[in-house]
Amino acid sequence: MTKETHSEHRTKSVPNQPTAEFAVIGKKYMEEFAKVQTEIFDQVRAANQQWMERLQHQTKLASKVAAQLATAHSIPEAMSIYREWTSQQLQIMANDGKHLFEDTQKLIGVSARLLSNGWMSDWTRVST
């Protein structure tokens, strides 16, 4: 009875393993994964920047409304200021919802591309 080395045992247990092809496919997928990860990071960074700009806009709007209310001379004038502010808030919320939907679609598109590049079909082709 001969004593096998670890590498001999591994080679014997998987005799038809095309390691070079696995390496090529693995490298290809790691490169694609890194590319997609960079795209996702860029999209998240851009979305974050847009949300920060919206937050600054909201802060300026709240400050403006507070100043207008401080100088209001009557209840009808204050109600008019609130009515205008409410209208602006509804428009902002609609725009925020639209931007959130668009940002989410972009992220889903990149993620779907990552999953739909035939990864599993290449891996099963090599392993059989």
Image (cartoon, rainbow, N blue to C red):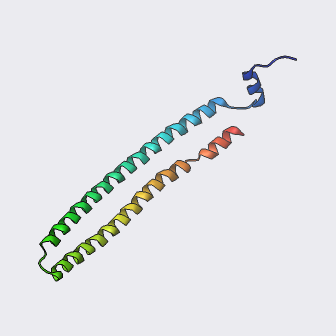
Is residue 112 rendered to the left or right of residue 13?
A: left
Quarter of the image where one finds residue 15: top right
Identity of the residue furthest to the top in this view: 2
- Above or below, comparing residue 125 to residue 97 in the picture: above
Q: Residue 80, percent across and down? A: 19, 79
Q: Residue 59, percent across and down? A: 24, 60
Identity of the residue furthest to the right in this view: 1
Residue closer to the observer: 69 or 22: 69
Residue closer to the observer: 43 or 76: 76
Q: Residue 110, percent across and down? A: 47, 51
The residue that appears at 71% across and 32% down in the rendered structure is: 17
Q: Residue 16, percent across and down? A: 74, 31
Is residue 80 rendered to the left or right of residue 39?
A: left
- Above or below, comparing residue 116 to residue 97 in the picture: above
The residue that appears at 48% across and 55% down in the rendered structure is: 108
The residue that appears at 43% across and 48% down in the rendered structure is: 40
Q: Which quadrant, please, contains the N terminus?
A: top right
Q: Which quadrant, please, contains the C terminus?
A: top right
Quarter of the image where one finds residue 95: bottom left
Number of marks in the image?
Answer: 0
Residue closer to the observer: 66 or 42: 66
Is residue 69 rendered to the left or right of residue 2?
A: left
- Above or below, comparing residue 8 to residue 86 in the picture: above
The residue that appears at 29% across and 59% down in the rendered structure is: 54
